[in-house]
Amino acid sequence: MSAQLADVLPLNVPAPSARGFILHVDDDDAMRRSTALLLRLAGFETREAASGEQALTFADALRGKLDVLIVDYHLGNGMTGTEVAEEFARLLGHAVPTVILTGDPANAEVPWLSDAPVWLARKPLLPDTLLAALPALVDFRRAVAATTAARRD
């Protein structure tokens, strides 16, 4: 059997920082990696974590950078997505827009986050739906940050 070379087309990927910075927390490796790839191809800068505990270790590094948190509600034996979102808000000193993904929305607890929207989304979520929602969430977070900074000045 002979090998054939495939036609390779260049992929134009926008500058990552242009669209926003997303942290995606999911204990399902395949889901986390495929979502990160989708987000990067759409021009978002991403960081991934396999657990709530791992995600929280990024808090200091993400201060002032994190635009949106995407978190699976059921994270195995560790924290829930709600606990991750609430703890991130505490560690950062402010909440960020949060997308909680769950296959069981009737039994998922919505986090109490002041000054940030929370979207409880049923899995599976269509990629186009997620990508359509993210720019408004990034814009919201940046507008709140700018208003907060202006009040301090």
Image (spheres, rainbow, N blue to C red):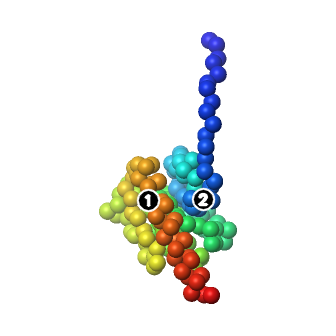
Q: Amino acid at mark 1?
A: Ala
Under tag 1, what secondary structure?
helix
Quarter of the picture containing the N terminus is top right
Q: Give left or right: position of 99 versus 12.
A: left
Q: Position of residue 80 (x, y in %)?
A: 47, 65
Mark 1 Cα shell of 10 Å, populated few (<14), some (14-19), many (≥20): few
Pick the front one: 55 or 46 = 46
The reply to whether callout 2 and callout 1 are in contact (CB within 8 Å) is no
Displayed quadrant of residue 65: bottom right
Q: How many numbered marks are there? A: 2
Q: Which residue in the protein does label 1 denote? A: 133
Q: Position of residue 125 (x, y in %)?
A: 40, 51
Residue, x 57% and y 47% (percent of image)?
41
Mark 2 Cα shell of 10 Å, populated few (<14), some (14-19), many (≥20): few
Question: Which comes before the other along the chain, label 2 or label 1?
Answer: 2
Residue found at the very far left of the displayed protein: 106
Query: From what the image shows, is residue 76 above or below residue 65?
Result: above
Q: Position of residue 9 (x, y in %)?
A: 61, 33
Displayed quadrant of residue 101: bottom left
Residue, x 60% and y 87% (percent of image)?
152
Q: Which residue in the protein does label 2 denote? A: 18
Q: Which mark is residue 122?
A: none
Q: Is residue 56 visible?
A: yes
